[in-house]
Every structure is written in structure tokens, then in C-alpha cells.
Amino acid sequence: MEKHVKRIGVLTSGGDAPGMNAAVRAVVRAATNRGIGCVGIRRGWNGLINSDFVQMNASSVSHIINKGGTILYTARSLEFMDEAGRAKALATCRLLGLDGIVAIGGDGTFRGALALSRQAAETGMSLRVVGIPATIDNDIGCSHYTIGFDTACNTAIECVDKLRDTMQSHERCSVVEVMGRHAGYLALYVGIAVGATAVLIPEREVDFERDIAEKIRRARLAGTTHYMVVVAEGAGSAMEISQRIHQELGIDPRVTVLGHIQRGGSPTARDRETASRMGYEAVKVLAEGEGNQIIGIQNGFITDIDMETALSMTKTFQMDRYLILEALTNSQGGDF
């Protein structure tokens, strides 16, 4: 049953992820379809503190579903972490007459949203918040998938495929560092997709002899003359790994740190479609008078989860995929 919700806000916070614009579009259009006004809050929680906002309608989000980045900009806010900063944000909410906020981002974004809602309740104000997970690391515990992950994977795969050409020509080893400070999903998926010689992830303690040296030696015996090592940034320094390969195996590797290129680019069909469904569901939750929820994907289905419960959840790493990688590379050392 729908409650009387007049106006909501939407923001993007933390690191950007391809598909954020698709989520913003879905929130604005789903709200408009229900007769709910929508305000875009620019530059994340900083925008709420500094009253940096723009009125939005169906036309203002036309032609953005295919664009990377976020038209609302994004930032991290130290001021918002303090009660005084959140008090300023709540003053903006009162000024705009917001009944709810859809926050698109990661774990830090959701913790900030929950803190804001609780502080509002303490002052007698009703402000419901809903989170949409968007991060290329795919590391949100309550959701099997996060917006931006598929696009980041495809970007990294395209880069590695191009590196393969020059590596093969020069019979070299390449060490490629991808994002993933605390989670190795990106490295693992990319490693499987490109047929990497070795993949290092933060969820598994790195043993140089077992995880790299032995695999390169096996590939050599199979007649391979070029090798690919994919490293999640949280598993170790690509430069240090490269130096050790040179010292212990006599190979002169080349290091490529993909960096922020992984966050850019036009979102894939999967990220556009997922973002659209999540944005629609977020507005539905607010329109029905619910709040303090995170929209997630569980077993392929969109679901909404209590925010406090969701933030306590941890994601079990998919070690079955690592076993698949091992099985496919152990005989020949990968495709490189």
C-alpha cells in the first residue's frame, strides 16, 4: 500500500561505477511515474551539507543511461561523519521537504545514510533512506552483484587482450594490477576470462613458489613463451611481484596498473538493466512507506534488506571459481 510521499532525493557517493547514471535515471523516472518529486543531490553527502542540489524530471535524465560516471558527481565527505555535519544535511532535507533519500554507492555510503536517518529520528523528523549498491569491486555483503562490476570486468579484459598481442610478439611476461583492495572478484573473473597464467587475490594468502613460479615453469615446459599474472591490488604490489619474477625466474616482466580506467566507460547491458531494476525497486520501497533498506540481488532476484542487517552481512568468496581457474591452468599454465 502506497504512503503519501511527496519528494525524494537521489545522490551518488564514494567511488564512481559504470551504471550509476542508469540508476539515477531509473529513480527519477520511477518517482515521476508515481507523482513523486525528485531532487538530485550533487557531490554526495557534501552536496546535502552544502545545499548543492538540482530539481530533476524525466527529461533531465534523458540520454544518460549509456554514459559512464555520474551526472550528479560524487565525493567522499569527512564532515558528514560528524553529528554536526549530518545536522547541516538534515537542515537541507527540511528545506527541500524530502521524505526519503536514495543513496547509490558502497558500504560507506550506506553507513552514512543509516546514521542520517537515525539522527533525523532523534529530532522527531521522519527521513527514510534506501541504498543501491554500486561498486566495481562487487564487495557488498548483502548483494550477490553490484552495479559496475560487469563493465569493469569487460574493460580490464579488453586491456589484457591487447597486452596479449605485444607480449606474444616479444615473448614476455606481463603483470597486470586490477582494483580490489579487499576483494578479489575482479581479478578472479578477469583471470578466468583471459586464461591468465596466475591470479593473486587478497582472500588467499600468496605463496610465490606455488602461485606464480610453479605455474610459469609448467607453462614453459608446455611450450608457452609469454605469461600473464593478474594481481588484485590488495594481494600485493605488482611492481614487487614483477621484481621477484625477474630475480627468481630470470624473466623480465612488464607491469601494467590499470587503475581508474576500470571505473570508466559506457556500462554494459547487464549493468544498465540491473541499475534500472534497482532504481525502480528503491522508489517502490519508499512509496510504500518503508525505509532504511538496501536493494540487493539474492540468487538472481531483486530484494530489499533491512539496512542494519545488510551492513552486518559478509560475502563468502567464491572459491569454487578459483578452483575452476586452477583446473584450467594447471595442465598448460593458462593461455599465455
Image (spheres, rainbow, N blue to C red):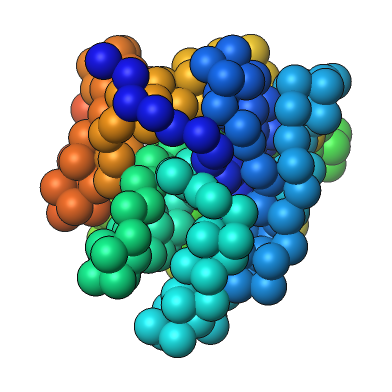
Q: Is residue 49 above or below residue 139?
A: below
Q: Nearer the viewer, residue 64 or 196?
A: 64
State the image coordinates of residue 288 (x, y, percent, origin top left): 31, 24
Q: Is residue 239 above or below residue 208?
A: below
Horizontal arrangement in the rendering, residue 66 relative to residue 133 (left or right): right
Task: Examine the rendering and report whether any part of residue 52 can be seen.
Answer: yes
Q: Residue at x 53, y 59 (%)?
A: 93
**How many numbered discs?**
0
Q: Residue at x 57, y 45 (%)?
A: 9
Q: Quadrant of residue 151?
A: top right
State the image coordinates of residue 82 (x, y, percent, origin top left): 42, 84
Horizontal arrangement in the rendering, residue 167 relative to residue 243 (left or right): right
Q: Nearer the viewer, residue 111 or 99?
A: 99
Q: Nearer the viewer, residue 228 or 158?
A: 158
Task: Examine the rendering and report whether any part of residue 235 can be seen.
Answer: no
State the image coordinates of residue 239 (x, y, percent, origin top left): 62, 70
State the image coordinates of residue 19 (x, y, percent, origin top left): 64, 31
Q: Residue at x 45, y 86 (%)?
A: 84
Horizontal arrangement in the rendering, residue 117 relative to residue 320 (left or right): right
Q: Quadrant of residue 148?
A: top right
For the C terminus, the image quarter is top right
Q: Residue at x 53, y 77 (%)?
A: 88
Q: Nearer the viewer, residue 202 or 275?
A: 275
Horizontal arrangement in the rendering, residue 63 relative to residue 78 (left or right): right
For the N terminus, the image quarter is top left
